[in-house]
Image (spheres, rainbow, N blue to C red):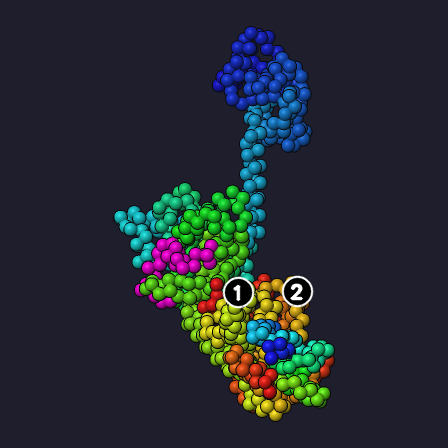
Amino acid sequence: MSDRLSLSSAIPGDKLPSDASRRVDVVDLVEESVAVFGLDMRVTAWNAEAERLYGWKREDVIGGVIQAAVRCSPSQPLKVILEKINQVGIWRGEFVRRTKSGATVVVKAKWSLRRDLAGGPIDIVETSRDITDVRRTEEALERVQHQYQSLFKSSVASFFELDFSEAAQSVRELLDSGAVDFRAFLQNNSGYVRGLLEMIRITGCNDQSFLTFGDGNRETLLRSFDRLWPDESLGVFAESLVAVFEKKDHYSSEVVLLSLAGQRYDTLYAVSYPPQLLELTRVLVGVVDVTQAKRATTARERSERRYRDLFHFLPVALLQLEGQEVVDIFDEARSQGVTDFSDHLKTHPELLDRVLNGLKIVEVNDRTVSMLRAQSADEFKGSVARYWTESRDMFREAAAARYSGKPGYEALVKMPAHDGTILDALFFSVFSPIPGEQNLSLVGLIDVSDRVRAQDMLARVQAEIAHAARVSVLGELTASIAHEVSQPLTAIGTNTEASLLWLEHSPPDIGEVRELAARTATEVQRAADIIDRVRLMASRTVPEQRSVSVNLIVEEAVLFLRHELQRNEVTVSLDLASELPQILGDRVQLQQVVVNLAINGIQAMALDNSPTRILTVRTAAALDGGILLEVEDTGPGIDVNDAGRLFESFFTTKATGMGIGLPICRTIIEAHGGQISAGSQTNGSGARFTIRLPTQSCRSQPPASPSGGP
Amino acid sequence: MKDSLISIIDDDEATLSAVAGLMRAKGFRVCAFSSAEAFLKDLSHEASQCIITDIQMPGLNGIELKRRLDAQDCKIPVIMITARVEQRLQSLAVSSGAFCLLRKPFKASALIECVQRALAG
């Protein structure tokens, strides 16, 4: 052996250095580091690998003690090593050494004692190998192992280590027996699958496995894997085997597993396969109990199903809309700094069409199909544009509401059905507040055509009754009206006769005639005005909603009653507040109310033969922003027994009354969004009727006569 | 007769001026008052040869005015005009001693004839 040759050169007393260096070259070919030192530990040989490993040159160490060269800390004290080597001639062990540069190296060393022919010790040959990297890897591996074990033990997941060898053998035999469709075979042979499970043994598991699947005794779980699998879950196990066959490196699925105590668990079953499963025996399986999560999912599914049920079976027409294009249009508008989207749409009508066409119907329920008179839900595919031809303004406001982030919008709209009928519908829309679903909205429709028709009819009937009541008032006022008209007629007749007389003068007095003609024209106008007032009261027009002044209405009513007041020797006191806001209403009907209340007061005072007869009409701004109108008299007042029935139809205390005056007053006032009440004068015994009317700005509900709306 | 002084009382300004105008056209002298009180206050009222008065007026009415004149033993004929139609009022007027009663709207010729008869009587 060459190393033996070369090593012999290191024998002390060798006098041939050139020869020695030649022979040492051979030692240098060895991959291990080689050092030779005497029993006194002084180094006599040091090969190239030793130079490389420790950083010291041969000349640095030859003659010095080995400890100086390697700064050793041996795994055993030197004395123990030397004792051992004296006894058996050889020692193996590890050193942690320092190199010249100070780096730590771990070496695996073998010391051999060389003896002379007489058996006396000559020197020690150390061969060593750097195992620093190996040791580092081992340590890392150990750490990983430790972490893995901690995880394995403490995880909330259950882990099973399975011995698959017997089952793998069985599968191998099956596959070797001929070409079979493995999946189909497993599907059709649940007994075989069950058999495989019986062959698989649980060889290890973590604490969680015991907690979840055990029966209190740690040992009983470490038997066959089969007991965790109910029949219903065999398919999943079969699929996990197919995954191996298809060379997948893992498989996971939800599956029901049983604990030894019989508890069912919804689990997530995950198995990770080594590359060569059928040759290997150990397989690791993870099982996570998802019963809770499953329950939550079930609850969510149930809630979704409930939503679907509601959507489809609620007796309200519902439409699910999608409007990504609308969201884009909104973004576009926002980037342009648009704040008032309604205004923006007014100035860009083509944009309204884009919004209409961009809003697509995704789904409708049965009620929508029947309400909009379609044959099937399929007819609703497309945009919503066709439904908004009659109420574009409302759609614009709905879009603006959505733009400004409101949660929803509702309005009364006119909507064309599929057969062309125009329906009155209550439209409401709910915008999804969920980020990412902002393109979705839900729309509901309630057909209120019947209700609107009924309201129209009610308004018409009320208008008819109000008209009848006005005509009845005119009847009561016949004498006054006749008197009123006779005044200008008398003047006209007399002026005409006088004119003729002036014309008969010689010469005719044209100046007088001209003046009389002018006065006559004035009187004709006066007569025409009276007739206008009467005609207005007698009119049978549909109630209008116009901006009117309450003070003006009071003044007209008093003018109308001028003679009636005079005839009954009643003094009128008007206490009208200046700068009252206008109200929205029907001039004729409101005047009718004032006339009605005034006549009641006049008649009450006349019948009672009251010595003082003062009718006071007062207007004032109400504290709530509306208008207060009071009509009070100095008559006998209201009998407390009658107070509650005053506004009932056909209730009257008058000999000739029909009992429709006050009920009509109430109907009219309520249709204007106001209230009327009866009471007594603050000072004295007379009656006082108080009316509260909302102004245009504080009007909360539309008048009861929609046909009269603007 | 042409120079006769006719006093006219009516709260309706249009009727008052129309009747006054008619009387002037017939060549009478005319005094016009918008109320009975104003007439009574006027010192010249006793110089009237004929009084034309509306019945229904605020304050003193035509019939009360006639009673007041009777109480003063004033014999000036009083012609009453009214727009009212009640029978009761007519009989009241007649019984008060009105020279004649005309219902508005009356014919101008009827009033002239009335006045002429009153002046002749």
How many residues crowd mark 1 within 10 Å: few (<14), some (14–19), many (20+)?
few
Q: Is residue A84 visible?
A: yes
Which is nearer the N-term, disc 1 or disc 2?
Answer: 1
Q: Could you tell whether A263 is left or right of B24 in the image?
A: left
Camera-side residue of A435 and A667:
A667
Asked whether the residues under marks 1 and 2 belong to the same chain, the reply is yes
Which of the chains bears the disc numbered 1?
A
Inter-mark Cα distance, 1 to 2:
46 Å
The dot on residue A17 is: none
Mark 1 secondary-structure assignment? helix
Q: Could you tell whether A352 is left or right of A37 in the image?
A: left
Indicate the amino acid at tag 2.
Ser
Q: Mark 1 highlights which residue? A: A510
Q: Is residue A388 magenta?
A: yes
Query: Where on the picture, by quarter, is residue B41?
Result: bottom right
Q: Is residue A521 visible?
A: no
Q: Position of residue A80 (x, y in %)?
A: 66, 31
Residue at position x 51%, y 15% in the image: A26
Q: Mark 2 highlights which residue? A: A578
Which of the chains bears the disc numbered 2?
A
Camera-side residue of A623 and A167:
A623
Q: Position of residue B61 (x, y in %)?
A: 65, 83
Mark 2 secondary-structure assignment? loop
Residue at position x 54%, y 8% in the image: A19
Give the number of the mark in front: 1 or 2.
1
Q: What are the residue bounds of the magenta stretch? A: A369-396
Q: Position of residue A247 (x, y in %)?
A: 37, 44
Residue at position x 42%, y 63% in the image: A414
Residue at position x 67%, y 87% in the image: B75
